[in-house]
Amino acid sequence: MTDFVMETRELRKHFRLIRAVDGINFSVQAGEIYGLIGPNGSGKTTLIRLIIGLLRPTSGSIQLLGETMPNKAVLSQVGYMTQASALYEELTVRENIAFFADMCGRRDATWMEEVIALVDLQDRVRSPVRTLSGGLRQRTSLACALAHRPRVLLLDEPTVGVDPQLRSTFWSYFRELAGRGVTLLVSSHVMDEAERCDRLGFMRKGKFLAEGTVEEIRSVRGTSTLEEAFLQLAAMETEGGAH
């Protein structure tokens, strides 16, 4: 039997009449890059916040690293990169990274230097965050999420607003981390990023329209691209025919 790093069962989160997450079942294995793919407002961010324990579910269950969430004890092993920057503007790049490592009680000077090199910030470690460009802030945010050597990385739209070259660089980082055994959950609305994931969950209106590898989804829908598959599934869901 496979031991999943992350697993949800009939997970739901309702905000009054809004069903932000509506009966999600999925699981992720160690060292896997799992993509949550869908348009803005589909429920991706709410699902990630449920998994990390920032929100309590209306119903259903979440297992993360063998523990039922929410569970603060698990968080020292989880890295979380939010859509909006959570950096401290007046602190330097290095000070931000050190702060987030200390928050999880896992500062390791050697690992910090490796993380700084990984995101290519060696020349800007003494720069206050307020002086950084948008792309450099994104790199710093990723470094902060990695600062405590997490086993699981939750990345909410990590490449939004960055140029194509930096997007490609980020995905090279993600693949390298997965090769080291880190498990990644990455949300995106960009279809070419979906192609880089090991498995996908196509999300719309709080539900999964489809799940599987890129090849499986294209094959089942009989399409040549993921975008065509998603549009077909979205049309079926609108007509009440998607399962």
Image (tube, rainbow, N blue to C red):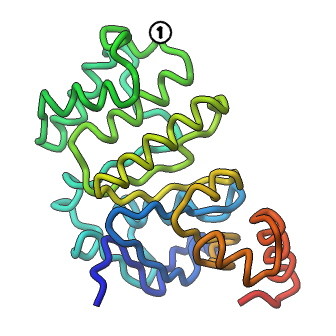
User: Which residue corresponds to the image point at 40% horizontal and 72% vertical from the top-left?
Assistant: 28
Q: Is residue 120 above or below residue 193?
A: above
Residue 165's spot in the image, x, y percent? 62, 29
Q: Quadrant of residue 108?
A: top left
Q: Is residue 42 above or below residue 164?
A: below
Q: Provide the residue designation for mark 1.
A: 131
Q: Quadrant of residue 128?
A: top left
Q: Quadrant of the C terminus?
A: bottom right
Q: Is residue 11 left or right of residue 103?
A: right
Q: Quadrant of residue 143?
A: top left
Q: What crowding class fits label 1: few (fewer than 14 Cα within 10 Å), some (14-19), or many (20 or more)?
A: few
Q: Is residue 55 above or below residue 67?
A: above
Q: In the image shown, does 28 or 67 lie closer to the viewer?
A: 28
User: Which residue corresponds to the image point at 55% horizontal and 62% vertical from the top-left?
Assistant: 35
Q: How many marks?
A: 1
Residue 60's spot in the image, x, y percent? 42, 84
Residue 206's spot in the image, x, y percent? 63, 73
Q: Quadrant of the N terminus?
A: bottom left
For badge 1, the amino acid type reads Thr
Residue 157's spot in the image, x, y percent? 56, 47
User: Which residue corresponds to the image point at 25% horizontal and 35% vertical from the top-left?
Assistant: 100
User: Which residue corresponds to the image point at 44% horizontal and 83% vertical from the top-left?
Assistant: 59
Q: Is residue 125 above or below residue 87?
A: above
Q: Secondary structure at mark 1?
A: helix
